[in-house]
Image (cartoon, rainbow, N blue to C red):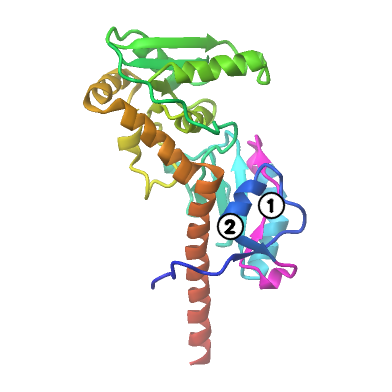
Amino acid sequence: MICPVDMERIRLWHDKAVDERIAPLVAEIGTSRVVDVRDADIVLYPDLIWAETDVTKISLAISPYHRLARDNGKLLLVFLVSDLEAPVRLRGNSLRLQRVCLTGKNKMRHEHPMPYLWECSAQAFSPRPKSRLPIVGFCGLKDSHPIRSRSIDAVAAESSIDSRFVLRTSFWGGRPNDPTLQEQFLNNIEQSHFTLCDRGSGNFSMRFYQVLSCGRIPALVDTDMVLPCADQIPWRDVVVMSKTPEALPGRLVAFYHDRNMEEAQRRCRHVWERYLSFAGFGTALGRQLQREIFVRRSSIMQRIRKLVT
């Protein structure tokens, strides 16, 4: 069964204006809004679920839309941005949940990764040329997770790395909108070849996507994160990953000496633009949804044929 490369625009139904935080993404998917849910391909949950970690509250919020989608044979599309690692379970096969925080061992079939799309850099920094030692930066809260703390300690102890760490005692130093702290955060990324991007409270990293957008190389421990577009992005060739915090310094040093660092930094920005920005991920998600819609339509047609023969 082959899905056509260019299908018509996805027909989307929602009962109110789309949350402004995901409206740019929905616009890039390639959709047209329909008035009657029966004419839709997808029912959209129009709110972005943000910072909610209570599975029961999430399920209760989306359940009316899920019933509507299920009763009309449609797919429900939901976006979740929070530290929640537990799966969100609803009966049936009508849910597609895009979420920033996913752990491979807990992932359910209807759960799919998405990048953290917000607060990324509109333009990349100029690639940083090689220096005597690889420069590894980090500006933020050290103790949000033991893995992050161990990585920082391991890199700081490595004499063959120039570590430039600005450690906070609270998230964004307790002042997330302070322009001085924001400038320090970006300066730390710009002045480094690599930035540590280990998980925090949830099994994902906002910093990971922000660093890519800046044209710098994320470094992190593999904590069974499910990264987006893994079928198209060779993640272990783009970023630096290790199995343990203690192994990360060696991987950083090897990457630094084996690669053309300016090309590696430009590649990070290219990957972000093509797959992880609003435009890039919207296009990729649109293609994924088209394939899913095609499969669902084909399955329905097969069931109809069986009933009439």
Q: Position of residue 246 (x, y in %)?
A: 31, 18
Q: Is residue 40 magenta?
A: yes
Residue 62 is labelled as 1
Q: Amino acid at mark 1?
A: Ile
In terms of depth relative to the viewer, which is nearer, 112 or 122?
122
Most extreme residue toward the left, as rendered?
258
Q: Is residue 242 visible?
A: no
Q: Is residue 125 magenta?
A: no
CA neighbours of label 2 inside 10 A, class few (<14), some (14 to 19), many (20+): many
Q: Amino acid at mark 2?
A: Leu
Q: Which residues are magenta?
A: 34-55
Q: Is residue 13 visible?
A: yes
Q: Position of residue 269 (x, y in %)?
A: 43, 35
Q: Is residue 147 left or right of residue 16?
A: left
Q: Position of residue 238 (x, y in %)?
A: 34, 35
Cα distance between the residues tagged 2 and 1: 10 Å
In terms of depth relative to the viewer, which is nearer, 276 or 67?
276
Residue 95 is labelled as 2
Above or below residue 56? Residue 40 is below
